[in-house]
Image (cartoon, rainbow, N blue to C red):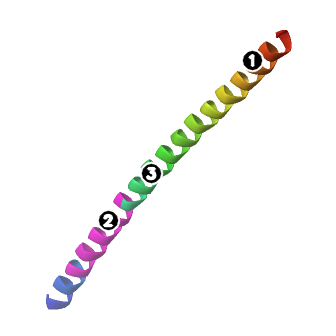
Amino acid sequence: MNEYQNLAHESFILAGEYQNLVNESFILVREYQNLAYESFILVREYQNLVNESFILADKSKLC
């Protein structure tokens, strides 16, 4: 019975470690999603700056 209890205890510990890895994976995925969203925002800001540059260049041609 003692060996069974030891195996059960080890299984419980491994299950806890597995759950921690799953939790860490979810955290990493969330961080990746946040970075992807921030990159999207930066690309959008860059596109806006490029568009503004073209508008300013067109205005300067009119002067």
Q: Amino acid at mark 2?
A: Asn
Camera-near label (2 vs 3) is 3
> Residue at horizontal 21%, vertical 78%?
8
Camera-near label (1 vs 2) is 1
> Residue at horizontal 43%, vertical 48%?
30
Q: Is residue 45 left or right of residue 26?
A: right
Percent position (x, y) of residue 37?
52, 39
Provide the secondary structure element on which disc 2 rests.
Answer: helix
Q: Mark 1 highlights which residue?
A: 55
Q: Mark 3 highlights which residue?
A: 31
Question: Mark on residue 20?
Answer: 2
Contact? badges 1 and 2 (CB < 8 Å): no
Q: Amino acid at mark 3?
A: Glu
Q: Amino acid at mark 1?
A: Ile
Vertical position of residue 14 compared to residue 60: above or below: below
Vertical position of residue 10 compared to residue 25: above or below: below
- Magenta span covers which residues? 9-23
